[in-house]
Image (cartoon, rainbow, N blue to C red):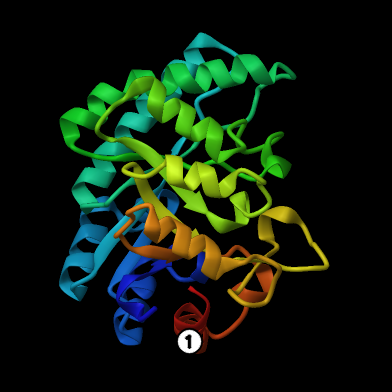
């Protein structure tokens, strides 16, 4: 695959702010960028819009909304309000999708937390529909069930999409989170028509801290080409984000890193 669909997820160059990530992407000939809300907040939404527009880039996604489950009704209401703000930010940035990382259980009741996730999505859907902002449920690997998301399979995400049948609700597929699933290929096929994002990276052994253990494509055990072919066969035609959380990669010189990413993207995706 050529690099036309390559998007730099901002977390991959974690030490760059919005201005640096935008300038670096443009210099590398990368046409898409995925922005993170904390970095957008530092720069300001209006300034982030200006930077992206002036560079001629497009925003593949804004990360993140979600985190719906909470111990009290007040906290859940606050999180709904924050998701509405995230939708507003995504609309202003012209993002293709707002990524939903759905959140962990506030206690040990994972079933109740999943119910709260569904309730949270239902609560923000009318706002997203009015703003014409797609919401992409990103299932995370089960290792993150305790601290990041109780939605841990693509099947669960697909079930939520089917349950609400909204034109703006879909899934985001990250190879790091789904590669292990024996049902992944049938669930990718089931997701046809509502795949809103696709992220690539690799699962490197020996395993470090799961959050920051992702590797560059080709350095790990994931069959990235097969997953990529399945996602494309399911009809996904959008940008493909390289999203890597890794302290060693963050410490590399970023211009050289982007050249490495481009090469690996062509070879492995």
Q: Is residue 41 left or right of residue 59?
A: right
Residue at the (50%, 25%) spot, across then down: 68
Q: Residue furthest top?
A: 73
Q: Is residue 78 left or right of residue 49?
A: right
Residue that label 1 marks: 263
Any part of residue 37 in sight = yes
Label 1 Cα crowd, 10 Å radius (few <14 / some 14-19 / many 20+): some
Any part of residue 64 in sight = no
In the image, 166 versus 59, the foreground residue is 166
> Which quarter of the rendered picture does the N terminus lie within?
bottom left
In the image, 156 versus 106, the foreground residue is 156
Residue 239: quarter of image: bottom left
Residue at the (31%, 43%) spot, across then down: 193
Q: Is residue 195 left or right of residue 199?
A: left
Q: Residue furthest right?
A: 206
In the image, 159 versus 132, the foreground residue is 159
Residue 146: quarter of image: top right
Q: Secondary structure at mark 1?
A: helix
């Amino acid at each position: 695959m050529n690099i036309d669909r390559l998007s730099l997820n901002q977390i991959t160059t974690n030490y760059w702010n919005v201005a640096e990530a935008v300038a670096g992407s443009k210099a590398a000939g990368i046409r898409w960028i995925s922005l993170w809300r904390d970095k957008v907040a530092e720069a300001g939404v209006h300034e982030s819009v200006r930077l992206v527009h002036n560079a001629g880039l497009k925003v593949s996604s804004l990360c993140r909304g979600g985190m719906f489950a909470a111990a009290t009704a007040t906290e859940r209401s606050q999180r709904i309000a924050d998701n509405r703000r995230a939708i507003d930010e995504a609309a202003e940035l012209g993002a293709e999708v707002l990524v939903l990382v759905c959140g962990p259980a506030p206690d040990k009741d994972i079933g109740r937390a999943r119910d709260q996730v569904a309730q949270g999505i239902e609560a923000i859907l009318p706002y997203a529909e009015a703003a014409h902002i797609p919401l992409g449920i990103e299932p995370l690997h089960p290792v993150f069930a305790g601290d990041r998301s109780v939605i841990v399979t693509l099947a669960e995400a697909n079930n939520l999409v089917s349950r609400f049948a909204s034109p703006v609700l879909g899934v985001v597929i990250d190879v790091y989170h789904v590669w292990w699933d024996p049902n992944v290929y049938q669930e990718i096929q089931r997701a046809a028509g509502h795949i809103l994002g696709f992220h690539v990276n690799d699962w490197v052994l020996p395993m470090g801290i799961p959050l920051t253990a992702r590797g560059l494509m080709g350095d790990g055990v994931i069959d990235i080409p097969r997953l990529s072919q399945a996602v494309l066969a399911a009809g996904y035609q959008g940008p493909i984000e390289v999203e890597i959380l890794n302290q060693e990669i963050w410490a590399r010189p970023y211009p050289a890193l982007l050249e490495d990413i481009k090469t690996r993207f062509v070879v492995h995706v």
